């Protein structure tokens, strides 16, 4: 693919100025504008819930707090929205990453809670076991 100037339409079509255009000020001649390439759609937008899923999951994973649960919920909602939209939005990878990181964070949170409960109940000084 060459790196030359973009293709132009014939005079009066597309990006060319209308007929009778006197030229640019300062004597630089007429201004020509490139024509948009046909057949190329604009890039799809990212799903906001997918972004929120990943942000909550990573934030919850770092702080070991409850945002991981929100990250998992947002991830599943995002995957459902992406399936219904039929390819009009991007973000499936973000949503999957948010769900996975969120589940890992939830598992670590549950592990810590269970470890604390076991440690408190096994301490002979507090009347437990």
Image: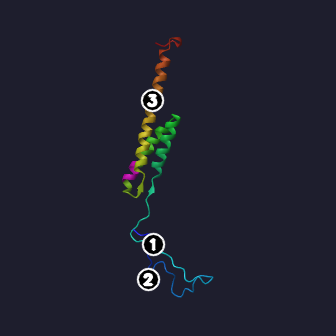
Mark closer to the chain start, 1 or 2 = 1
Question: Do we see residue 76 in this rendering?
Answer: no
Rendered location of residue 65, percent (x, y): 51, 34
Label 3: which residue?
110
Mark 1 lies on a secondary structure that is loop
> Which disc number belongs to residue 10?
2
Q: Nearer the viewer, residue 126 or 30?
A: 30
Does 81 lie within the magenta span? yes
Rendered location of residue 54, percent (x, y): 47, 44
Rendered location of residue 71, percent (x, y): 46, 42
Q: Which residues are magenta?
A: 79-83
The residue depicted at 37 percent of the width and 54 percent of the height is 84
Mark closer to the chain start, 1 or 3 = 1
Give the Cα distance between marks 3 and 2. 68 Å
Q: Depth-wise, is mark 3 or mark 2 nearer the camera?
A: 2
Q: Nearer the viewer, residue 102 or 12?
A: 12
Q: Depth-wise, is mark 1 or mark 3 nearer the camera?
A: 1
Hey, which residue is sitting farthest right in the picture? 26
Mark 3 lies on a secondary structure that is helix
Label 1: which residue?
4
Give the Cα distance between marks 1 and 2. 18 Å
């Amino acid at each position: 693919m060459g790196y030359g100037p973009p293709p132009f339409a014939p005079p009066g079509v597309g990006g060319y100025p209308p007929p009778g255009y006197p030229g640019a000020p300062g004597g630089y001649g007429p201004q020509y504008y490139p024509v948009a390439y046909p057949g190329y759609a604009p890039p799809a937008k990212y799903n906001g819930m997918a972004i929120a899923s990943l942000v909550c999951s990573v934030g919850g994973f770092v702080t070991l707090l409850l945002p991981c649960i929100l990250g998992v919920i947002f991830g599943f909602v995002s995957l459902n929205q992406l399936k219904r939209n039929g390819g009009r939005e991007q973000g499936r990878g973000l949503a999957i990453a948010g769900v996975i990181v969120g589940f890992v964070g939830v598992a670590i949170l549950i592990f810590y809670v269970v470890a604390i409960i076991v440690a408190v109940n096994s301490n002979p000084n507090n009347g437990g076991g």
